[in-house]
Image: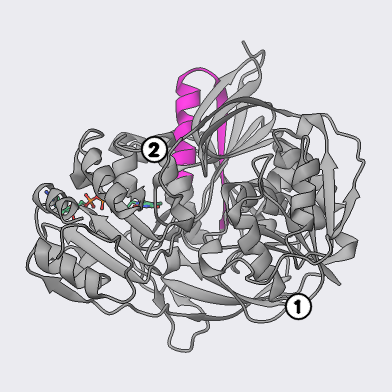
């Protein structure tokens, strides 16, 4: 067994709700998020859920949830607290942050917190970068297991099954370590109303970038944002026969030679 | 300056993704080196040296590298950064795991999922599940990029007239904090998703693992690869490595046939650049029809066997 209760830091991001299709601004400067429903990034939700399950299993003593963003991201911190995290930390920042910024900030936070496990989503569904967890692991010189679909903690080790191109890969890492979550790790619970009420009383600290002595990176500049080329809806065919003969006659389609046609 | 490609292989052959990454790297118009780490990779190094279009092959051969972990590779690659303006990897699970770790050690951000190389420092990449395309400029001295292979092709030119120089690196192995436990790779005689010409994908409506035989039979007659929606994978009908979408594989075959798939934005993100899209769904309002070139409103359990019988 582990000799001390483990501390987990979960980082969560406020993003466009996964059900909402994003619009591009007319001046092509960025996407338009005004009046858009925002939620916790689904992969971050899975990370919170996993941390809570580890705590319920008696393997984790404390869950700290961190979000970086404007005041509105406290909403997502409160959601994580309602799901079972113990305390929150908002790092106040009104401008967009890059994956390396987030990794730098979490690296700084670790110097005070000394967590045993970082649980992060594998990607956020807005920028789709899939970088932050790996960067944090590099800065901390921790082992990393990305795209986790199963996590087991025992004897101060994490045994993680990862979703990889060819199937599944299981690795064992010594703690401290960084784990990023994939979709099939768990199904996040809904917070019950009493828990939502309790979450309002859980501690939520606020720090600024200056408190952490962080300077944001500037290496990647956003030049413009465009809508992708739209596909035209095609034709609805009336039968299997019609569909198959249409496919055979489409020059873009190489159907295998078939023996029944005369 | 030069470009460095981090090769991916199965100890015997370079992966197709690496050759496509080479195709993308050539657009940068500067000499290209390839880095290969593994165990007993002498032959692999020679094969790479004769691919053509490669200046130098760097090999790091060590028995402990039979399974290469990002923790081991990233510091070694980051140490090479002064010689390279660009470090390229495929956006595969290997590349996505490793590239950010290299970038952070170089003190830079990476550009993920490049779909277009506009110039030596401007790229296009999809964001928001492909519902927007960002053009970004990378001002880093050493740029780390991952290449979305469905948007590029392998170089078409002749193999090298004389093989590229092979340089064997001798590097001490650091302590490894990660240990391999096991690997479950799906074995399949069907074409691979990311190189298949035709893909047949099944969704939640297929209903069970056993029912997926309908999809397999149809795909086999077509010589197609098989894919799936997240709902079908979550339900255990089919393996996770066959999920197509924002968080699965991104594919662009000549023909993509979606069967019993509604067409959620996360699924479309993985297949909407296919040349021809065919959808079979019993709901005429299913969003998949809005991107399909050819649609059939039908019960898949009748339509799919009938289509198979046509072949
Ligand atoms: C963060 C995140 C990431 C995601 N990533 C992915 C991803 O990478 N890939 C992915 O696919 N999804 C992904 N999803 C899930 C996605 O939102 C959808 O839930 C999923 O794609 C739905 O799968 P489906 O179309 O098979 O199922 P459903 O949406 O349930 O659709 C089933 C369809 O089958 C039709 N149907 C029913 N019976 C029949 C019949 N007898 N014959 C013919 N048609 C029939 C129905 O009309 C319906 O359209 C993600 C979701 C989130 C939140």
Nearest the eye: B266 or B22: B22
Q: At 84% from the left edge and 52% from the top edge, which residue is drawn?
A: B58
Viewer can see residue A95 = yes
Is A236 part of what is drawn in magenta? no
Please name the colour scheme applied to the rendered image. one colour
| Residue bearing the label numbered 1 | B29
Screen quadrant of the C terminus of chain A: bottom left
Left or right, B157 with reference to B256: right
Label 1 crowding class (10 Å Cα cut-off): few <14, some 14-19, many 20+?
few
Element marked by disc 1: loop
Bounds of the magenta span?
A: A44-68
Where residue A82 sits: x, y (%)?
A: 40, 39
| Residue bearing the label numbered 2 | B239
Nearest the eye: A49 or B261: B261
Viewer can see residue A139 = no
Count of all numbered marks drawn on residues in the image: 2
Where residue B216 sits: x, y (%)?
A: 28, 43
Q: Mark 1 and ligand 1: say if the CB distance to the nearest ligand atom is below 8 Å.
A: no
């Amino acid at each position: 067994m582990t000799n001390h209760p483990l501390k987990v830091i979960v980082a969560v991001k406020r993003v466009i709700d996964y059900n909402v299709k994003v619009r591009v601004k007319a001046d092509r400067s960025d996407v338009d998020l005004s009046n858009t429903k925002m939620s916790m990034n689904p992969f971050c939700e899975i990370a919170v859920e996993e941390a809570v399950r580890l705590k319920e299993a008696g393997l984790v003593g404390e869950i700290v949830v961190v979000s970086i963003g404007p005041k509105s991201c406290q909403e997502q911190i409160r959601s994580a607290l309602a799901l079972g995290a113990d305390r929150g930390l908002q790092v106040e920042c009104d401008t967009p942050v890059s994956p390396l910024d987030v990794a730098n900030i979490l690296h700084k936070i670790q110097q005070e917190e000394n967590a045993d496990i970082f649980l992060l989503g594998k990607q956020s569904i807005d920028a789709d970068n899939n970088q932050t967890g790996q960067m944090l692991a590099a800065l901390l010189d921790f082992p990393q297991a990305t795209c986790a679909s199963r996590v087991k903690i025992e004897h101060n080790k994490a045994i993680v099954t990862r979703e990889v191109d060819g199937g599944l890969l299981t690795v064992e890492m010594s703690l401290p370590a960084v784990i990023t979550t994939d979709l099939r790790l768990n199904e996040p619970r809904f917070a019950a109303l009493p828990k939502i009420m309790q979450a309002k009383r859980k501690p939520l600290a606020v720090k600024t970038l200056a408190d952490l002595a962080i300077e944001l990176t500037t290496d990647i500049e956003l030049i413009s944002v465009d809508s992708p080329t739209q596909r035209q809806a095609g034709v609805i065919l009336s039968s299997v026969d019609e569909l198959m003969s249409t496919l055979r006659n489409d020059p873009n389609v190489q159907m295998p030679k078939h023996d029944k046609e005369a | 300056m030069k470009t460095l490609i981090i090769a991916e292989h199965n100890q015997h052959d370079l992966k197709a993704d690496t050759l496509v990454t080479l195709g993308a790297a050539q657009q940068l118009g500067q000499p290209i080196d390839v880095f290969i780490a593994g165990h007993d990779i002498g032959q692999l190094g020679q094969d790479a040296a004769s691919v053509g279009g490669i200046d130098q092959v760097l090999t790091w051969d060590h028995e402990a590298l039979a399974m290469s972990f990002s923790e081991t590779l990233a510091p070694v690659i980051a140490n090479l950064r002064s010689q390279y303006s660009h470090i390229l990897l495929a956006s595969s699970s290997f590349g996505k795991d490793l590239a950010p770790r290299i970038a952070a050690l170089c003190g830079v951000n990476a550009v993920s999922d490049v779909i277009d190389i506009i110039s030596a420092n401007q790229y296009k990449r999809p964001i928001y599940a492909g519902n927007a395309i960002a053009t970004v400029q990378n001002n880093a001295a050493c740029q780390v990029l991952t290449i979305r292979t469905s948007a590029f092709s392998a170089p078409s030119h002749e193999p090298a007239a004389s093989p590229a120089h092979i340089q064997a690196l001798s590097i001490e192995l650091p302590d490894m904090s990660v240990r391999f436990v096991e690997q479950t790779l799906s074995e399949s005689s069907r074409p691979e998703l990311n190189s298949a010409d035709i893909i047949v994908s099944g969704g939640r409506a297929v209903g069970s693992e056993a029912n997926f035989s309908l999809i397999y039979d149809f795909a086999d007659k077509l010589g197609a690869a098989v894919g799936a929606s997240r709902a079908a994978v979550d339900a255990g009908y089919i393996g996770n490595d066959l999920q197509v979408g924002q968080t699965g594989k991104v594919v662009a075959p000549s023909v993509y046939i979606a069967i019993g798939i509604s067409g959620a934005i996360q699924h479309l993100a993985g297949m909407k650049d296919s040349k021809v899209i065919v959808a079979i769904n019993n709901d005429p309002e299913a969003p998949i029809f809005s991107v399909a070139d050819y649609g059939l409103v039908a019960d898949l359990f009748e339509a799919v066997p009938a289509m198979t019988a046509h072949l």
